Every structure is written in C-alpha cells, then in structure tokens.
Image (tube, rainbow, N blue to C red):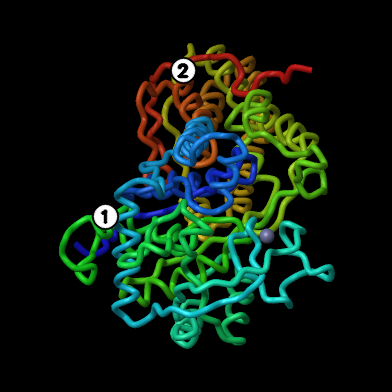
C-alpha cells in the first residue's frame, strides 16, 4: 500500500532518556501536536509518533551511576516521557522505544538494506568523541579551548575499527533534492544552512562501536563484535514504527500508507541528522524522503540559556499547574514566532494570560452569554447572515506553513473585532430602547463568531475549545475545517449555558 493522501504522518524526535523531560521537549511535542490537531481538523487521518531513544554510552553510564541495570533505567525514564505527553495533551497515536523488538528488527533490516546497496564498509578510525553528543568531532568544529561547543567538555580520543556509512556518496543527490524542494527544511534559514553544508560535501560517518566500548546497543547484523552507533539506530524509528522490517519479505517491498512522513519535527541542534544523514540513509535503503523537516529554535528563559547550573530550567508541570495547560500551549506560539529562537518568561506569560485570554477571549464569551441570558431568555437568537471564509482560508494557509503566530494573530484580531462590536452596538441600550432585532443580530453574530473561534483555537487550546462549545450549547461537536468556513451552524433557539470563567484569576 503506497502513501495515502488522506493520511498525515508526523513525528517528534525520539527523546534521549539520559535525563528527565524539560520545557524544550514540551515545546517540540506541543508544536507537533498543534499540527497534528490541525490536520485532523482538515479531515486527515493522523499518525502522530513520539518515543524514546534508549541506547548509547551515555545511558549505560547514567544507569551505572544510579546503580541499576540499563533496561531498568530506561524503563523508568521512558515512562516519564509517556506521562509528559499525557500532561501536555499531546494527541499521540504511537510511542516507540528503541529497545522494543519491532524497532530492533527493523533497524537491523535497515542496516542490511544499506549494506546491500554497498554503502557500509569497515575501517580504522581515530577521532575526538564527545560522549554527550555521541558523535566524533573534527578539530575545526570544537571551540577555542578544544571543547565540544554544546557540552563544553574536551572530547575523548578514540581509536577503533568501525563500520562506516557512505554518506559522501549522497552529497549530489541531496543537493538536487534541496534544490528541487526549497521548503524541504523549515524554516528557510535552516534550509540554506543545510544546503551550504552540502556545498562543502559530506564525509562518510562511523555507524558502529565495538561491543567492549559499548554493550548497550543494537547488534550489527552478522558481526557480534559491533553494535550500531546511536543515530543509525535512532533515526530508523520513523519507519520501524510503521512496520518496516516487520515482515519476512525483503525490505525492497516495504510500502506503507504512512510513508513518506509529512513532517519530522525537532529542535535545531539535531536538524543536521534529520535533513542530511536520514535522507541519505533513506536513499541508500531505497525509500522515499520525508516531505518536510521542521527544525525549531531554542527557548531561552528570561533571556538566558536554560541550564542546571543557572537553576533556570523550567519544568513544564510547574507551568501547567500554575497557569493551566491551554494557557501554556497558547503562550508558546502566540509569543514567539515558531521556527526561530524564543524567550520564555513567566512575566510575559502572565501578561498574555491577562490580556489575550482573560480579557479578550474569556470576557467576550462571558459577557455575550450573560447578555443572551438577559435579553434573549438564554437562547441563541435568530440566525443572522455572515461569512469569514477568506479569513479562515488565510488562517489555514498559515497553519499549513507552520506560521502559528500569524494564525493566532488572525484569531485574535477577530476576537477583538467582536469585542468592539459589543462596545459599538451596546446591546443593553438597544434592549432598553426596545430594538429587539438589533440586539438579536449583534448577539447572534458574536455567538456564531465564538463558535468559529472555538474551532480555530482547537489545535492550540483543545480543552478551551470544548469548554467554549459546551457553553454555546453543543453537547457534542466535532470540530472540522468545513465547520469553520460554514456560517450559521449555531442553531437558533439552542440553549446557552453560563459557566465559570474560561481563564480564572491567577493565584497570587
Ligand atoms: Zn557534546
């Protein structure tokens, strides 16, 4: 079964289980979830994959340090990542662990496919290896003190015989792919950055370690003295999760209604592995390349890089318990343009909470329903014509292009326009003067607008969306993009329900 055009396949990276989840992981997974929910809104069937990367030297060492076996160690941390996705409201449909048999079998099949293509060979290698990054560095990529630029540690000098992947062979094919697909990597600056690396040419990379150095890994097929290097193992999760290697017939026959993936989402530091190494591996294994690699920027906290030593690591659970899940999800994409680096700050979050959520949206819903209860017996007034088709097409274009901030701006312009409509039309004055038709027209326009807003915000704020729809009298409503552009689905005569505010006062 080849790729089905009604299917949308989106992934986060599999998270490395050497430490607990933090706000950076949350940012990636919520971004992917916003897109997953938007695609469902558009009628697609969505496969949303996340999981945990559980092999490597760093994990074996972390388990040792804790005095537990590696499997016990990874079981425990993998569970914390599963729990995090529940807490984030991430609508995942699959969770893969690289220690699962379905992955191990598939990763080994993938290796065999690359070997059959003549792309794997053995050679002695000596190099500077950062355990933190699980990668070799060439001196020019180290900082002035000869340290790994990410971990600020001097890498270890390692010499051993390893298997290599002929990455260099694919430089030209990838150049062509980048040139023919100018939006292969999002955002544009990172597409350019990767294209520049290709201009300089790719070098073959080591894809295995000797079992004495690293026992915690997937055995290389046909050579039990070596285990797979973590990236060659980890990246294949995107196909092993959808059944690659599950059947006995040859890998050449692999097709899936999900493949190629529509989007691999990640933070920029691993863009290179997804935009260059993974496509080369896929070419080698004769599989189609993903539609898009989405590499977002980093979050700083109050203008500073998050770090344990600065004590400014933000725990997503703390943010959720104080401000609510939807406010957190909303803030991440309302405040910072998705793709670039952004700054997280509690002060800015509170300002957005008060202005955009309590004041603009929460208030609009509350006062409109209160007026409808007072002036229209709590019923939806007679339908008034209207349309916002063009607006929602623009919204959809932004969403499809990962332009979450402009999409939210469109929604909020509309929210503010409806608030202004109330201030201008003054339904309480109209009611006092007996102008019933004016009152009904204004209130219907706003209530139906609120129904549309509830749908448009649903990828970002799923709970809020449901609460809004419940107050508008829907006991069940399946948000769809078609419902967004179709005016008048809010039925005249329906019962409105006044509830407590969508966004309560914050505790001091
Ligand atoms: Zn490093």
Label 1 beta carbon within 8 A of ligand 1: no
Instruction: Tell me what residue is drawn at x 49 percent, y 84 percent.
Output: 168
Q: What numbered label is drawn on residue 251?
A: none
Q: Is residue 464 above or below residue 259?
A: above
Rendering coords of residue 353 (x, y %):
70, 31
Crowding near pointer 2: few (<14 within 10 Å), some, many (20+)?
Answer: many
Rendering coords of residue 136 (x, y %):
61, 69
Side of 174 where 352 appears, left or right? right
Residue of label 2: 496
Residue of label 1: 243
| Res. 449 in view | no
* The image quarter in which residue 368 lies: top right
Q: Is residue 285 above or below residue 46?
A: below
Q: Is residue 215 above or below residue 67?
A: below
Q: Earlier in the sequence, mark 1 or mark 2?
A: 1
| Res. 387 in view | yes
Instruction: Tell me what residue is drawn at x 54 percent, y 32 percent.
Output: 446
Q: Residue furthest left?
A: 249
């Amino acid at each position: 079964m080849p790729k089905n055009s009604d299917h949308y396949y989106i992934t986060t990276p599999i998270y490395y289980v050497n430490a607990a989840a933090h706000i950076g992981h949350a940012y990636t997974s919520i971004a992917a979830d916003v897109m997953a929910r938007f695609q469902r809104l558009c009628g697609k069937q969505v496969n949303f994959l996340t999981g945990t990367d559980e092999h490597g030297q760093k994990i074996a060492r972390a388990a040792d340090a804790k005095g537990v076996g590696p499997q016990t160690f990874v079981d425990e941390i993998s569970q914390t990542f599963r729990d995090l996705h529940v807490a984030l409201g991430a609508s995942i449909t699959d969770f893969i662990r690289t220690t699962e048999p379905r992955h191990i079998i598939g990763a080994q099949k993938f290796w065999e496919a690359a070997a059959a293509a003549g792309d794997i060979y053995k050679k002695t290698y000596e190099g500077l290896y950062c355990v933190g990054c699980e990668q070799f560095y060439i001196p020019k990529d180290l900082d002035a003190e000869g340290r790994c630029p990410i971990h600020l540690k001097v890498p270890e000098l390692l010499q051993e015989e390893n298997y290599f992947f002929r990455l260099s062979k694919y430089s030209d094919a990838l150049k062509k792919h980048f040139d023919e697909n100018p939006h292969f990597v999002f955002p544009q600056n990172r597409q350019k950055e990767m294209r520049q690396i290709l201009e300089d040419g790719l070098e073959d990379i080591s894809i295995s370690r000797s079992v004495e150095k690293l026992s915690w890994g997937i055995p290389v097929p046909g050579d039990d003295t070596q285990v797979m290097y973590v990236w060659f193992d980890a990246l294949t999760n995107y196909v092993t999760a959808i059944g690659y290697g599950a059947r006995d017939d040859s890998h050449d026959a692999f097709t899936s209604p999900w493949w190629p993936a529509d989007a691999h989402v990640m933070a920029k530091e691993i863009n290179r592995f997804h935009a260059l190494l993974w496509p080369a591996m896929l070419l080698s294994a004769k599989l189609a390349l993903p539609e898009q690699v989405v590499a977002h920027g980093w979050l700083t906290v109050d203008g500073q890089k998050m770090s344990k030593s600065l004590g400014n690591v933000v725990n997503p659970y703390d943010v959720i318990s104080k401000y609510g899940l939807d406010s957190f999800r909303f803030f991440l994409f309302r405040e910072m343009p998705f793709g670039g680096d952004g700054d997280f700050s509690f002060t800015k979050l509170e300002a957005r909470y008060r202005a955009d959520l309590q004041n603009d949206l929460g208030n609009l819903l509350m006062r409109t329903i209160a007026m409808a209860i007072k002036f229209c017996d709590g019923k939806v007034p007679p339908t008034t014509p209207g349309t916002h088709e063009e607006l929602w097409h623009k919204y959809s274009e932004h969403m499809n292009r990962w332009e979450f901030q402009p999409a939210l701006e469109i929604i909020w312009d509309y929210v503010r326009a409806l608030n202004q409509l109330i201030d201008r039309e003054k339904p309480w004055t109209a009611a006092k003067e007996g102008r019933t038709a004016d009152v009904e027209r204004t209130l219907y326009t706003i209530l139906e607008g609120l129904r549309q807003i509830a749908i448009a915000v649903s990828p970002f704020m799923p709970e809020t969306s449901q609460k809004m729809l419940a107050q508008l009298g829907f006991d069940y409503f399946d948000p769809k993009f078609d419902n967004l552009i179709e005016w008048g689905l809010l039925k005249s005569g329906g019962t409105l329900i006044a509830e407590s505010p969508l966004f309560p006062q914050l505790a001091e």
